[in-house]
Amino acid sequence: MAEGIKDKVAIIGMGCTKFGELWDKSPEDLIVEAFQETVEDAGIDKKDIQAAWLGSHLDDISIGRGVIVFSMALKLPFIPATRTENFCATGTEALRGACYAVASGAYDIVLALGVEKLKDVGYAGLPESGNLNMEGTLGRFTSPARTAPGAYAMMATAYFAKYGLSPEDGKRTLAKISSKSHHNGTLSPKAHLRREVSVEDVMKAPIIAWPLGLYDCCGVSDGAAAAIVTRADMAKSFRPDPVYVKALQIAASSGEELLYTDYDYAHVETTYRAGIAAYREAGIKNPREEINMMETHDCFSINELTQYEDLGISPRGRAKEDVDAGFFNLDGKIPNEVDGGLKCFGHPIGASGLRMVYEMYKQLQGKGGPRQLKDPKIGLTHNMGGTPPSCVVAVGIVGL
Amino acid sequence: MVGIISYGVHIPWHRISHKTISSAMGWFNAASPPGEKAVANYDEDSITMAVAAGTDCLNKLEREKIDGLYFATTTSPYAERQGAGVIATALDLSPEMRIADFAHSTKAGTTALISACEVVKAEAAKNMMLCASDCRLGKPGSTQEHIYGDGGAALLMGDKQVIASLEGYYSVSYDFIGEWRASGEDFEHSLEDRFVQDEGHNKFITQAVSGLLQKYQLSIKDFAKLIYPCPNARLHAAIGRRLGAEPEQIQDSMLASVGNTGVAHPLMLLVAALEEAKPGDKLLIASYGNGSDALFFQVTEEIEKIRDRRGIKASLALRKELSNYEKYISFRNILPIEKGVRGEKYEGYFTPLARQWRERRAILALCGSRCKRCGTPQYPPQRICVKPDCGAVDEMEPYRFSDKKGHLFTYTADNLAYSPSPPRIYGMINFEGGGRYWFDFADCDADSLEVGMPVEMSFRIKYEDKGQGSNTYFWKVIPMRT
């Protein structure tokens, strides 16, 4: 009888590079830097690592395909190494591979690392593939020439229409979300963007894809993050304050959202399903009461708004009330994007999932610096790749 | 009796006034005729306009029963790839038929019409379809820039439920080098206007019409309408007078509302005449281009049953002023503008042509599948049914979406995405009868869109891959036209 992963695996070391427009760093530089911080934090040697899961998304501008660039940059000594990819959930996917390797009993000490060098594209935004990357070769013919902001902007249009929000009111709600995250970024030394951005700044910003404006969209940046995991019953031999994995779930779109007319494009079904599965795996019955902090996938402000509902924290259609009350602010009941989120770090695709866990890990160990929350016990990460009707979502829960 | 069973037209949404053109180029070419002309959008060409006209023509008709297709144009985007083949696939016609492109002269449309009728008369086919369109370019500062409009017409010829029977025809053909264009050239050369009009238009049209009247022992008075294209209003009137026609007999040339649409023009004027025609009317039509074909039709009682086509009147009313000359010349690829790396990458990224061949019905005809077990239409075609509690495997039948109407479910106007006419507008629509998908939008402004509004589909260029020398076609959403 399958039991899930709760309390079988512990994280004993993590590392995270500075995120930003790192013109002077190649992917190999970022891989090595994240790795170094991780093994130092874990207090182990490279030769202790028995297997590795390495994640990156975009073949053509980061490290190509397969795992060779990773294994050769790190000089991993001929150990089992796998490159994994699952759109923007790649980081969590790498962690999943490492955790399952340990939980299966096949290995005791495993590395998970994610990296992306988005700024090598040569122009603003994610690289253009005519949606072939998103929808395969048929998408080159049948897919609208959409961008990431556009795909999510359509969720804003549908959400506003469904819940009767005027564009002004809707945008203002989204603006509060972005402004909240930017404030957290000012307290976050590794973040790319570290300036306060007011609600009015967000409202007045140029439109990228209507109704989303500049500050409704996360930045495009470079970075890497990593973790070392081990068996829960070995964890305390490495450090007194390991962080335990309570749940790791992924849900992938079935096709119903895009191709069948029931889907309302005002929520993300995969977030909802992965959330339910993660709560069940972690034994959480009332997320609004039991989750202390979160890092959710705020590539676009509308995405974060719907996550509050899809993760079962705010009631459907009423997340605005929680936003207005500051429920998810740093001093709120469940701070979200504690480190500033994708909003302030940007989104090096392969790295983001692990950067989210890094913040939860540090908070649980009392090392959150100026962002430190009071006695957090349980943190949730949510990592999403694709578009609202066609996506994959990873939800992770870690705790003491 | 053989003749026209159905008709359709396409007039592009954008109209540019002659004042806008002369504001830009008047310093070089002072002449400015009255009115405006229709210009294709950046995502239209002769093939897409032919599909649009053909769709209008095939309204409610059984597409499987079409026996053949002719495509007439002087502006095919291809020198080798049958335009008729793309059109037939987009219209979801059977591949088991004969098709042909009629090209290289603006009289090719009437020639194709005659040939199509002859095929039916010879009982080699029960019906033949004709699509005629043109997208001719005039060089900035030229007379042609003012005169040449874009448009398409489609006719279905057959021997049952004929609305206008083809009673007779007469042709003259000459190697008249008044206007010409070499292969690969974008713009035509032309000799002095007066030479072309006097030696060409005036002589050939009157010769063909006179020859027709003589052959069938008829007089100009026998005709309700005299239909012929022209480069300008004065010549148009002069030819009519020369033939002894009364002003009210002469079909309005649409020069001030659409322009001269080349191969399509005489056929678009014919459709305009048919929209107003009464049973018993005789219509005389003459084309122009390296000679002239003159034909005449007799309208039948069946004409009353065909009034639901969109046709000329409704198409004329659907218009949007293109008030910017630079936009017009950039849409027509005369003015190169900065696409940026994103735009170049989008167009130049790998185009999997083997896949397009394999799934041509899905891509070019927008044909999806419908589950035979639960009845759910779905696009793209699926092998496993998308309905959550169905999931039937391989129980699908083909289901065409291109002629289905829908409603706008959600959309955005994207300033980041590459577009020749920013912002790029796209969204998701729910089809009437079931099914949904997301598409690029065409012929609309962002602020005219509303969630829930009715929409329909239009065949367009999806992107041009100049490096590969191909246009990739697909369907876009447009606000409902009917």
Image (cartoon, grey):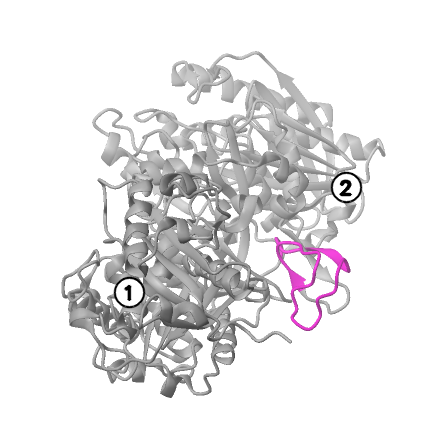
Residue B144, horizontal then vertical, whole percent = 39, 26
Badge 2 sits on which subunit? B
Quarter of the image for the N terminus of chain B: give it.
Answer: top right
What predominant SS class does the magenta segment belong to?
loop
Q: Residues within 10 Å of mark 1 (few under 14, many from 20)?
A: many
Residue at 46% across / 53% down in the picture?
Answer: A50
Q: Secondary structure at mark 2?
A: strand
> Bounds of the magenta span?
B377-403
For badge 1, the amino acid type reads Gly
Q: Which residue is identified by label 1?
A: A341
Q: Does any portion of residue B269 appear in the rendered image? A: no
Q: Secondary structure at mark 1?
A: helix
**Viewer-nearest of discs 1 and 2:** 1
Residue A232, horizontal then vertical, whole percent = 44, 71
Task: Name the one closer to the observer, A180 or A281.
Answer: A281
Q: Does any portion of residue B90 appear in the rendered image? A: yes
Instruction: Say left or right for A333 vs A80.
Output: left
A258 up-or-down from A169: above or below: above
For badge 2, the amino acid type reads Gly
Q: Which residue is identified by label 2?
A: B158
B277 up-or-down from A98: above or below: above
Q: Which mark is residue B333?
A: none
Residue at 28% across / 39% down in the picture?
Answer: B20
Residue A307, horizontal then vertical, whole percent = 39, 73
Q: Residues within 10 Å of mark 2 (few under 14, many from 20)?
A: many
Q: Are marks 1 and 2 on the same chain?
A: no
| Residue B379 within the segment the image draws in magenta | yes
